[in-house]
Structure formats: structure tokens, C-alpha cells
Image: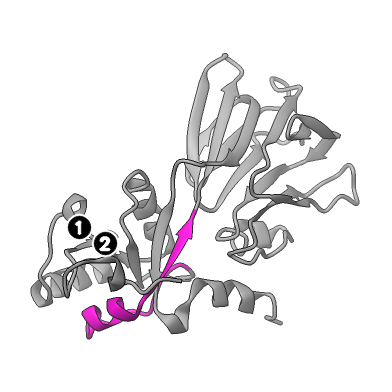
Amino acid sequence: MIKGLSLFKRAAPDIAFLASRSELAQSALMKFEKLYKHTEPYQAEIIVALGGDGFMLETLHRFINDDIPVYGMNLGSTGFLMNNYSSSNLIERLEKAQLIKLRPLLMRAECIDGKIKEALAINEVSLLRETRQTAKLRISIDDHVRIQELIADGAIVSTPAGSTAYNLSVHGPILPLQSNVIALTPISAFRPRRWRGAILSHGSKIGFDILEAEKRPVSAVADFTEIRDVRKVEVLEDPKRKLSLLFDPEHNLDERIFAEQFLP
């Protein structure tokens, strides 16, 4: 972990404020812009994001090529990726904040029509059946076939940051943030019935061949980017991009993920 403002040369960094469209977040935005000196997002050294986890993901995706540290304040529902909201002592909180670096997943999808499309995921890549019929997937790890035929509603590849989200809801494992692994989890597996997924090295390349792709269409979703009617999908950690999140020490993301493993 690195102290937030130790990254910056001045006593206070250039801050940009962004907010979701909710009335509560927009009201907070106006308050912050009156209280604190601010700049445009692409000129900022820190972005303060006001909203919920969905808005935090939107913000991280928007600046995914810029690696600007993002400090979120929760004005949504869950707020797993956010800090507690307060308009007071912002500079002091940023001075004490801890920096966490995340790498997104890169998804490459080949569609039935032959087109190749790419998208990035901070939480997870999901393969989902599009119709009432189950999906049939062949799964390879580093070009070696591990499951000849998974019959299921789909499958998820999750980062540690996303392991407590959709992945957890389908009984996937919670991954410590610094574990350097990713989770591969089936969604409602019918066959092999007892397969519960796998924990893989973060450098693994995961390949999906969609069997009977036209009869049993499948969509591939990287966070909120959906690509429909895919034939093949490849998922791997993106080596070129890093994301920077800032957290109050008492709301450290590492601790939150660890604590999730002990909830009743």
C-alpha cells in the first residue's frame, strides 16, 4: 500500500469531481465543487467519484487508459468499492488514503458472423445462454482442453476485486486481493454436475468454444459490455493496463474482501 498524496508533488493534488445521475449524487457534486478547488477530469491527479459501485465501474472504465487514482464516496446502495460519504476533511482523507492497483481482464470474442470484438472487465467476464436452452462450452486453459463439454447456464471468469460480486452469488470463491489468481466458476452447471470451478494463476489464458453456437446462442459480457452470439471467447489479464483505487485505511478493499469470508 502507498499513501495517497505521497504520489503527488504539491501539498494538495488537482482534484476532479464526478457524480452519478442520482439526485443525491448531483447534490453532493455541487457541494464539493463549492468547498474545494477542482479541475477537469483529464487534467486531474485524483478523481473523486460520487455514487455507487456501478458508477465507480463506469468511472474506472472511462479512465482505464489514463491510470488516474479514483477515490469513491458511496451515494448508492452497496458501495463495496467506495468509501463512506462525507463532505468534510476531504484533503486530510486523501492524505491518509491507501492506493490499490488492479489489472483488468481482456476479453476477445469471435462472433458467429466472424467479427472479432474486444472489451475490458474490472469485475468479471460472464458467458450467458441467450435462450431457454442451456449453453454447451468447451473450456481450455493455456490452450489445453480441461473440460470437453460444460452444460450450464454459463460461466464466469472473475478478478479478486469482482470475486465478491456476481461470482460469489453463484457460489464462486472469494479471492484475496493480492493473491495473483482468478476464479473460473460455472453458472448452474448441469454436467459435469459436481464441477464447482477452478482457481487459476492470474497469468492464465482461458478459452471458451461455444458448442452448437447457432442452436444454443451465448453472449459474452465484460462488466457491462455485452457481445451477443459468440462462437469463441478468450479471457486473460491485460498486461498493459493498471487501475488505481484509493481507500480510507479503515475501509481498505483488502480487509473488506477478507472479511467477506467470515460473514454468516
Quadrant of residue 211 in the image?
top right
Horizontal arrangement in the rendering, residue 210 relative to residue 150 (left or right): left
Residue segment shown in magenta: 81-102
Horizontal arrangement in the rendering, residue 118 relative to residue 144 (left or right): left
Question: In this rendering, does residue 184 appear at all?
Answer: no
Circle 2 residue: 47
Q: Element at badge 1? A: loop
Q: Nearer the viewer, residue 163 or 191?
A: 163
Tell me where residue 26 appears, x and y as whole percent: 21, 66
Horizontal arrangement in the rendering, residue 176 relative to residue 101 (left or right): right
Discs 2, 1 touching: Cβ within 8 Å: yes
Residue visible at 76% across and 22% down? 212
Tell me where residue 168 appears, x and y as whole percent: 67, 62
Q: Is residue 129 above or below residue 185?
A: above
Residue visible at 50% across and 51% down? 103
Label annotation for residue 44:
1
Any magenta on residue 34? no
Residue visible at 26% across and 62% down? 47
Q: Nearer the viewer, residue 26 or 143?
A: 143
Residue type, label 2: Ile
Tell me where residue 174 appears, x and y as whole percent: 68, 65
Q: Nearer the viewer, residue 20 or 202?
A: 202
Residue type, label 1: Ala
How packed is label 1: few (under 14 Cα within 10 Å), some, or many (20 or more)? some
Q: CA distance from mark 2 to mark 1?
A: 7 Å
Q: Element at badge 2? A: strand
- Which quadrant of the figure contains the C terminus? bottom right
Q: Is residue 83 above or below residue 213?
A: below
Residue visible at 59% across and 71% down? 257
